[in-house]
Amino acid sequence: MRSISDNPEPQESVDDRTTKARIRDAAIASIAEHGISGTTARKVASAAGVSPGLVIHHFGSMEGLRTACDQYVSGAIREFKERTMTGGPTLDVLAALRDSPNGPLMGYLAQVLADDSPAVAKLVDDLVDDAEGYIQQGVESGMLKPSDDPRGRAVVLTVWSLGALALHQHLRRLLGTDLTDPEILTDPAAAAYIAPVYEIYGKGILEEAFAARARAAFTESEGTT
């Protein structure tokens, strides 16, 4: 948030976020651009306009800062999805997409997903838990179909979405859409990815009779093991 003077003469913008929030946001942007290994307390401090010691003072360690970033990113995604799912079938999709928490958040996720660590496992678990909750909101609002396995559906959809982020370079190569671009929603190339996503989610791929037989086959095989 920025304050704007009533003085008609040009004034320098003042960042009135808290110091802790500035540090967190600087870390998210740095990780999105440079990755985890390329992000240091000194680099974050320089971007946030504070001393390296203040970074550690607020977060205890770089690991503590990473945890705060994870929590902020997952929370921003959850809040956006909850607002979207309560919109129901008449939701203005384009307006919702314009309000989505993109910026460096998708780039951040794309970078940290490659880190095989307990911290990333916790982040993914939180995203799945959140997805199960807001998908149920979508069912209740009439936007989504109910599921026989809500938890399983939340896991699969979350992993698919995160997989697209992890492979964003190939999506850019094949479709010309960069999911980590902070300005993706103003780029006409975004339709090359978003349109097929809505087609797949809305129409599905398999014929209903074949899908039913395949599901039954796997269910029966589980019962015999």
Image: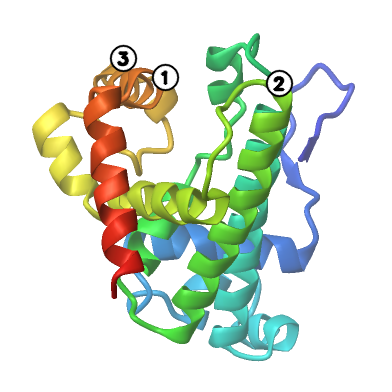
- What number of labels is visible? 3
Horizontally, residue 128 falls left or right of residue 60, namely left
Q: According to the image, label 1 marks what residue?
A: 186
Between 5 and 93, the residue placed more toward the observer is 93
Q: The disc labelled 1 sits on which kind of residue?
A: Thr
Q: Residues within 10 Å of mark 2 (few under 14, many from 20)?
A: some
Q: According to the image, label 3 marks what residue?
A: 188
Q: Residues within 10 Å of mark 1 (few under 14, many from 20)?
A: few
Quadrant housing residue 142: top right
Alpha carbon of mark 3 to alpha carbon of mark 2: how far? Answer: 25 Å
In the rendered image, the residue lying farthest to the left is 174
Between 58 and 157, the residue placed more toward the observer is 157
Q: According to the image, label 2 marks what residue?
A: 87
Q: Residues within 10 Å of mark 3 (few under 14, many from 20)?
A: few
Q: Secondary structure at mark 2?
A: loop
Q: The disc labelled 2 sits on which kind of residue?
A: Gly
Quadrant housing residue 192: top left
The x and y percentages for residue 157 are 42, 46
Question: Which residue is drawn at the image coordinates 15% and 28% (left, top)?
Answer: 175
Q: Are circles 3 and 2 on residues that touch, CB within 8 Å?
A: no
The x and y percentages for residue 144 are 57, 27
* Picture quarter with the C terminus: bottom left
Residue 49 appearing in the image: no
Q: Secondary structure at mark 1?
A: helix
Q: Are circles 1 and 3 on residues that touch, CB within 8 Å?
A: no
Q: Nearer the viewer, mark 3 or mark 2?
A: 2
* For residue 161, above or below residue 62: above
State which tag comes first along the sequence, 3 or 2.
2
